[in-house]
Amino acid sequence: MSNQAARLAIEGGSPVRPSMLPYAMHQITDEDIAAVSAVLRGTWLTTGPNVDAFERAVAAAVGAASVAAVSSGTAALHLAYLAAGIGPGDEIVTTPLTFAATANAALNCGARPVFADIDERTMNLAPAAAEAAITPRTKALVPVHYSGRSCEMDELRRICDRRGLLLIEDACHALGAVFRGRPVGSGPADLAAWSFHPAKHIATGEGGAVSSPGRPELVEAVRRLRNHGINVDARMRAGSKASWFYEIDRLGFNYRLADFNAALGTSQLKRLAANVARRRELAALYARELARFGELVLPAADDADHLSAWHLYMVRLRLERLSAGRAEVFAALRAEGIGVNVHYMPVYFHPLYERLGYRRGLCPVTERAYEGLITLPLFAAMTNADLADVVAALDKVLGRYRR
Ligand SMILES: Cc1ncc(COP(=O)(O)O)c(C=O)c1O
């Protein structure tokens, strides 16, 4: 490497990449565009036959008996909690290492999220910590399959059965993940919440779903709540013999998914297996290429019980081996054209949570992990050459800051 190339871009050297490699990126094919165009040429734009078809396709993909599509993963969590009867005075136990929506949805029900610490190796909610956080007010455990690797669901199920709690999985990272030979979503959780935001495995623009392997009545409740709590579908009021009459018996929302979003989702789902397979390939390549960096802790590898969907690829910096902090390494990698990110700051660090009385120090394993967390780019359309650029940038940056 010439001196110029070796000099960090942030210090005036030339970057590894001239333009930014994003950390996540959706993929749209001509087939996707044709599927959406067909809906746009039709007469029904909002929740209709394409949503029904999408729900059937999601059910088949995740091994669930019933699915209700909604307008986002956040809406999915909110309605899953409401369907589960979570309300003012109740608590859910979840991980602080998640997108804030997991906890915010509880606040939006008037309930209180209680944070339990993670397992340092898998970065997922530690079952023992979750059990220790249960109080008489707890209604549900809400594990999050961080980065796409399933939590220890059998253990969490046993805790829920012993303590009379619902098990609601935030599966927003985990479409296509497998736990003990079964797709995430097929049990043992009572309900699963999914997101189809473009950073995820499939995109509907915005979109989400609640699924269940064995509690159809809860999914039915979601179906009503997504439409203001109205007891009949709009289509049932559209025919020549239909009545204008409907009733609302429970306060709901407009969390409906539109038909053209659903058509995009159904089209994208056809490529889910290939998408996840490519992510697994890239994750294996990262593991091989990054093993030589003593400054990095790599994510837990797949094993017989856990096949991750590899939504994201997070590494942790061993800060004691570096002369710079995470912020400097982050900025230096960005300057090299690598669109690194951080998933996530512990939820209770947000000022909203501080105002609600949550204090730092609550989950020390999560807080320590957060100090060194960096998300490297990972998406199905990423090439091996893109990945080689990430490794080259890490080589430059970690080489410069190595102690
Ligand atoms: C773990 C987790 N939960 C919930 C959500 C919310 O999903 P959405 O962005 O579709 O509302 C996300 C999305 O980023 C997520 O990563």
Image (cartoon, helix red, strand yellow):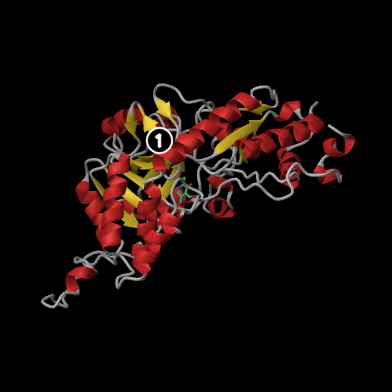
Q: Quarter of the image containing the N terminus?
A: top right
Q: Nearer the viewer, residue 178 or 171?
A: 178
Left of 286 or right of it: where is 5? right
Is residue 144 shown to the viewer in this render? no
Number of numbered discs on residues: 1
Q: Residue at x 50, y 38 (%)?
A: 147
Q: Nearer the viewer, residue 191 or 273?
A: 273
Task: Give the secondary structure at mark 1.
Answer: loop
Residue placed under numbered mark 1 in the picture: 177
Name the amino acid type tagged 1: Ala
**Residue 292 spot, x, y in % from top left:** 68, 22
Report crowding for label 1: few under 14, some 14 to 19, many 20 or more residues within 10 A (C-alpha): many
Q: Quarter of the image containing the C terminus?
A: top right
Quarter of the image for residue 131 reads top left
Left of 279 or right of it: where is 261? left
Quarter of the image for residue 44 reads bottom left
Q: Residue at x 41, y 32 (%)?
A: 151
Is residue 100 shown to the viewer in this render? yes
**Residue 7 spot, x, y in % from top left:** 85, 38
